[in-house]
Amino acid sequence: MTAQPEQRQPHKPRGGEASTMDAVRLRRVNRWQAQGLSGKLTDLYIDCREASAAEAYRSRSRLDFLNRLTGAIRRPGFAMVIAETDDLVGCAFGFPVRNDGFWWLGFDGALPQSIEQLTASGGVFAITSILVQPHAQDQDVARRLQERLLSDHQASLGATLVDRADHPTLAALRSWGWLDVGEVWRPAGPTMFRALVFPLGERTAARLTGLAREAWTRWPG
């Protein structure tokens, strides 16, 4: 499973127009509620795609997202947090990473000890998708969604895999606080994924100090 956060050019409120962030609320939903929201979630996904995309491409994207959402919902421990005002403006979802280290299978080189220890202790949660409506405060919404999803599961670290050729997604994640720590080979998907982590709390962030810089030197984008 891979995260695919979507981001367009920020919306600039017109004169007198209130920011949608003024009343954003976060709410956790269970797997059954997520199934019931699948239509709205897919609309949110499509709305976050490039407006100029061809209709055939948008249709394929809709089906791809629905398949990814359905697969995630079936995972043990699936969880989702949504951001809403009068409408749905964002969501993040995923599932706990098993402590057997299977998530990191195919990691290029030795897995950093700090990440290995956090995985073994059950402190890692895979965030497989983040969607945020484009507006001036989208970075703040994304951070709040990520942190709420991790804290609800008492996780110390978020983890995700992204196709290394998907530069817009990588740029969005990095702007939202994710650290690039290496590459993972997954035969069932693209040849290589970038592995990124999102530390929750100062202690976890301190344990990961230097990893992002080291990974960037070893695996240039």
Image (cartoon, rainbow, N blue to C red):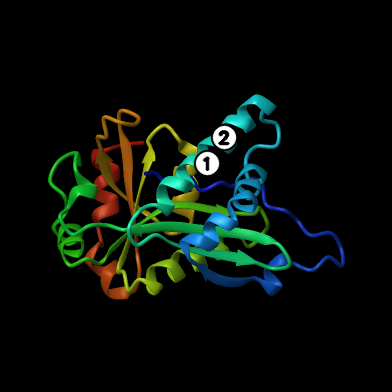
| Label 2 with label 1: CB-CB less than 8 Å | yes
Q: Assess disc 2: are there few (<14), some (14-19) or many (≥20) residues with their C-alpha within 10 Å of its C-alpha.
A: some
Residue at screen point 63% across, 62% down: 137
Task: State the CA–CA distance, disc 2 to disc 1.
Answer: 6 Å
Residue 8 x/y as whole percent = 64, 45
Q: Position of residue 48 (x, y in %)?
A: 63, 45
Task: Say above or below: 116 vs 202.
Answer: above
Residue 45: assigned label: none
User: Which residue is identified by label 2?
Assistant: 61
Give coordinates of residue 103: x percent, y percent: 24, 49
The residue closer to the viewer here, 52 or 25, is: 25
- Which secondary structure, mark 1? helix
Q: What residue do we see at 18% from left, 59% from top?
A: 99
Q: Secondary structure at mark 2?
A: helix
What amino acid is at disc 2? Ser
Is 86 placed left or right of 170 in the picture? right
Q: Amino acid at mark 1?
A: Phe
User: Dot 1 corresponds to which residue?
Assistant: 65
Identified at 27% across, 74% down, the residue is 203
Classify residue 139 by image quadrant: bottom right
* Residue 123 vertical placement versus 107 (above, below): below
Which percent across, then down, holds residue 89? 65, 59
Instruction: Name the image quarter holding residue 209.
Output: bottom left
- Is residue 198 rendered to the left or right of residue 4? left
